[in-house]
Every structure is written in C-alpha cells, then in structure tokens.
Image (cartoon, coloured by chain):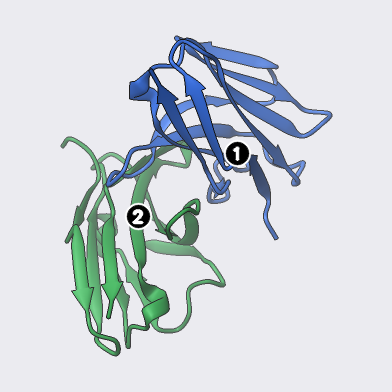
Chain colours: A green, B blue
Amino acid sequence: DTGVSQDPRHKITKRGQNVTFRCDPISEHNRLYWYRQTLGQGPEFLTYFQNEAQLEKSRLLSDRFSAERPKGSFSTLEIQRTEQGDSAMYLCASSFDGTYGYTFGSGTRLTVV
Amino acid sequence: QQQVKQSPQSLIVQKGGISIINCAYENTAFDYFPWYQQFPGKGPALLIAIRPDVSEKKEGRFTISFNKSAKQFSLHIMDSQPGDSATYFCAADFSGNTPLVFGKGTRLSVIA
C-alpha cells in the first residue's frame, strides 16, 4: 500500500453524460475526503467520510453529485448530467481521524466537452 | 467567504534566495496550519505543519512562522532550489474535526 490511488487519471465526457470516479485510500486511514481543484485555485472541499458514514457535504456539492464509501474502504464520486462547469481536477485524500495531515491522490482530471 | 487568504499569487526567486509565502486566517477556532506542495499533475503533498502553541517550526530548509495575535502564518524556504519550483498552499482546520480549508496557492519559480 503505497498511497492514495485514484482512477481514472483522466476522463473526457460529453455534456449530459454521467461519470464515476474511484478512490482507494491508505488502508489504515478511516477518513476519506473529496476535493475539487480548478486551474489556479486551491482545493475546494466537497464531502468526507469517516469509515462508511458521510459526515459532511459542501454547498458546492449539488444534487447531481453523489459519493459513497461502502464498507469504509474505497469511495466513488458520481456526477450525473455533467456540465462544462464540472471540468476540474477531482482530488481524493485520506487521513487517520483528521490528524497529521491528509495524503492526497494524484487526482482525476475531468473534461466536459 | 474565503477563510484563508494567501499571498503572493506568484513568486520568482533566485537560486539560493529565501522564498516567503504568507497566509492570513479569519476563524480563531483554527488550530492546525499545514503547508502543502503541489507539482503539476500531482496531488498536494504535506510539507510542514504547525499548531498555535509554538511560534515557529523548522524542518530542514522549510520554516513556518506563526503569529496568533495577527492571525497570520508564513512559509519560509531557505536556500531555494530549482526543484522547489511548485505551487504551495496554506491550509487550516479545527482539531481535525473540520475539513481542511485551503488558500488559493502561490506559484513559486526558482531560477538559476
């Protein structure tokens, strides 16, 4: 287990299509976070889980976005009816109880055309 | 509402010089202040972090200075090297109980 893995690394989709991203956290970490990053900006919080429970969702997370973390292991982030404004880097991070900082994956770059 | 304000947006430093990046926060409940380094195509990586019970923390060439009364903290990179060229983000949270809030980033270029 060498870190946080995200799949796919890149995704190009047509407007209106649904997309799903996967994140595999560090196995000992009980918290998993999703952030979105656009060009020239810092990561913006979307949602996070402690084990399998989704504890917080940002107002940025419209009803087209849904995230799951079944059995407290990997997580998926689904975007329905994608819009051009959804184009961004989607970052996943994990931590142990929020302490000692987060370990980020390399992200999934989404382009909506 | 931007809870963590970072400056400058970009910075060019000569090799061997000192790079200084500043952050100001608004929420006095914040008690954990990390800095992250991000290279193109990669996720942010934790560089160094500080809690408000100390005013300075040093790890190698990287130092965080913390001013609780001014609600400001800064990253100093001594003897800056071309390999330090990256985007740096400050962040803050409350005892790990709230998600990290990030600044907008500083793009550092170290030129020979």
Q: Is residue B33 above or below residue A64?
A: above
Element under label 1?
loop
How dense is the environment of label 2, judged by Cα within 10 Å: few (below 14), some, or many (20 and up)? Answer: many
Q: Is residue A25 above or below residue A20?
A: above
Residue farthest to the front?
Answer: B112
Instruction: Measure how far apart labels 1 and 2 are at the Cα level.
Output: 22 Å
**Which residue does the numbered mark 2 point to in the structure image?**
A91
**Which residue does the numbered mark 1 point to in the structure image?**
B95
Q: Is residue A107 above or below residue B95?
A: below
The residue positioned 36% from the left and 48% from the top of the image is A93
Dot 1 and dot 2 residues touching (CB under 8 Å): no
**Relative side of B33 to A83, left or right:** right
| Residue B26 x, y percent position in the rendering | 76, 46
Q: Which picture quadrant has residue B21?
A: top right
- Chain letter of disc 2 in the image: A
B40 or B59: nearer the viewer:
B40
| Residue A46 x, y percent position in the rendering | 46, 64
Element under label 2?
strand
| Residue B34 x, y percent position in the rendering | 53, 32
The residue positioned 43% from the left and 64% from the top of the image is A54
